[in-house]
Image: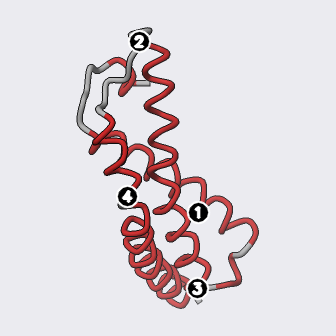
Amino acid sequence: MVWLQVEDVETTNVLLLAGAANIWGITAFAVRHISSGGTKAFMLGGFFAGVFSPITALIFIVVKAGYHAHGFLDFSTRQLTDMMKYSFLYGLWGVALGFIWGILTLAYNKAEK
């Protein structure tokens, strides 16, 4: 809700917000359903969180445009297409972060035992 109030025309903040929302959702799903999958499950979850971040960001942008009732988007068409163009790269970053998260989780679980 804080981001909706700001007249922001940079895609960085909305992508970070969307990425955080996706990581939270994928992690909650992974913990409930595929927690026995280990590092592979976190890597897969990270990939989906990364790939879906631009899509979630587009949804956030449309909601923000409707909330402000401008009649036009705060972001240019070039910004939106650039954001979607890098979806696969965000997915690769998600795999890397998921791998790190999985390794840390495994190390934490071994330390507890």
Q: Earlier in the sequence, mark 3 or mark 4?
A: 3
Which numbered disc flags the more N-terminal residue, 1 or 2? 1
Kindly indicate whether the residue at mark 2 contacts the one at mark 3 (C-beta within 8 angstroms).
no
Residue 60 badge: none
Q: Position of residue 41 (x, y in %)?
A: 61, 79
Above or below residue 19? Residue 79 is above
| Secondary element at image label 1 | helix
Q: Secondary structure at mark 2?
A: helix
**Residue named by callout 3:** 40
Between residues 41 and 81, which one lies in front from this camera angle?
81
SS for dot 3: helix
Say which of marks 1 and 3 sits in front: 3
Q: Earlier in the sequence, mark 1 or mark 3?
A: 1
Q: State the image quarter where residue 87 is shown.
A: bottom left
Q: CA distance from mark 4 to mark 1?
A: 25 Å
Amino acid under disc 4? Lys
Pointer 1 residue:
27
Classify mark 4: helix, strand or loop: helix
Q: Dividing the image into 4 quarters, which one contains the C terminus?
A: bottom right
Tell which circle, 4 or 2, labels the residue nearer the N-terminal end.
2
Label 3 vs 2, first from the N-terminus: 3
Number of numbered discs: 4
For disc 2, the neighbor class at 10 Å (few under 14, some 14 to 19, many from 20) is: some
Which is more toward the observer, 72 or 18?
72
**Colour setup of the view:** secondary structure
Q: CA distance from mark 3 to mark 4?
A: 26 Å
Instruction: Give me the residue at 44% from left, 9% from top.
Output: 69
Q: Are marks 4 and 1 in contact (CB under 8 Å)?
A: no
- What residue is shown with label 4? 85
The amino acid at mark 1 is Thr
Name the residue carrying label 2. 68
Camera-near label (3 vs 2) is 2
